Image (cartoon, rainbow, N blue to C red):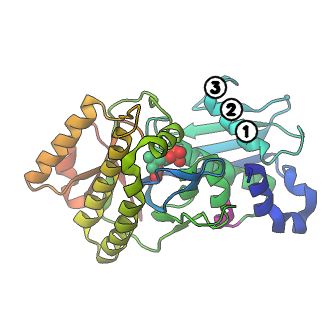
Amino acid sequence: MKKFDAVQLIFQPLLQQKGDSVWQPQREKGLAFAPTNIALCKYWGKRDEELNLPMTSSLSVALPEKGSMTHLSLHNKNEDVVVLNGEALSPDSQFVKRIKAYLDLFRQENTWHLLIDIQLNIPVAAGVASSACGFASLISALNDMFVWQLSMRDLSLLARLGSGSAARSLWTGFVEWHAGVQSDGMDSYAEPLKMEWSDLYMGILLVTREEKSISSREAMQRTIDSSVLYANWPRKVARDMVIFRQALQAKNFSLLAGTAESNALTMHATMLSCWPPICYFMPETIAAMQRVWQLRRDGLELYFTQDAGPNLKLIFTGKNKDKVVEAFPDLDVVKLFVE
Ligand code: PMV
């Protein structure tokens, strides 16, 4: 199935109710913020590349104040313009092409064009999930501008068509993305978990601001095509998802964060076993991991997770915050549940 057909399927009830007006902006502007999310149980590998359908379910936690604010306005010229953090991007950039292709899913002929002004307060494409919050805020801003009044489930389905992990970026807190089994992907959406953990922190440890060497899309595909370890990945996820639920229920921090670290390292192990190999580690990444492990041996409850980039996200609780910052003075500390 093509993305466009998936959109038609999601829009069916809306089309019956509002007719063709759903394809036209109803307001001059649209605005939305979406927080970025960091997976504790990673999404790695697609069962459908076109629809971004994952092989497995995944579980994330949002960084509530880090993310993407998207302002949309009508643009009278004959093409969309994307402005990122105040700078107009070249129409030939990959990012702009992805956004235009996404807007085309909602565009009947060339009836409108938009100025898409995105303010990101996290580094772009360095494994800090900028595309997740980017597409989640874009679909939410479109929902505002076109007055679709879609449910959160539908927004999650649509965000997924932009970037898989965007399906999880519509909420704060813990979010589970159900892999689903249907070939049209209508059961592959995310939902928030009714659970708070006021004492939980994440620290972004930026090793580099450089863009990643290989996109997660390409890396996932190569892993599936060439890693013999990948066959074990769905088993690892199934087991970890059970442990995550137990850890959340019992508020067992070391079980939660330790499972997140183990899950991330297993994902990277599948990549190292690809051919040609994929290695998102830089020397500084390894040095930081070893520092975390040493601190843990010394009694500090500190764990990390890593996505498709060299940067780490450290996981800890409030009581250890000062010690963690002392060890990593440049850490960007985020309280995961704000009152
Ligand atoms: O949604 P994508 O294509 O950016 O892939 C995200 C992949 C990971 O960040 C490595 C894992 C995850 O679940 O977010």
| Quadrant for the C terminus in the image | bottom left
Q: Is residue 177 left or right of residue 238?
A: right
The residue carrying mark 2 is 97
Residue 172: x and y in percent read 49, 61
User: In the image, is residue 201 part of the stretch drawn in magenta?
Assistant: no
Residue 19, quarter of the rendered image = bottom right
**How far across and down, in percent of the image, does residue 323 sit?**
16, 49
Contact, mark 2 vs mark 3 (Cβ under 8 Å): yes
- Report if the CB atoms under discs 1 and 2 are less than 8 Å apart: yes
Disc 3 secondary structure class: loop
Q: Residues within 10 Å of mark 3 (few under 14, many from 20)?
A: few
Towards the viewer: 36 or 104:
104
Q: Identify the residue at image location x=14%, y=55%.
A: 300
Amino acid found under the numbered disc labelled 1: Ala
Task: Residue 93: give its label.
Answer: 3
The residue segment tinted magenta is: 151-155
Q: Which residue is mark 1?
A: 101
Q: Amino acid at mark 2?
A: Lys
Give me the C-alpha separation between circle 1 and circle 2. 6 Å
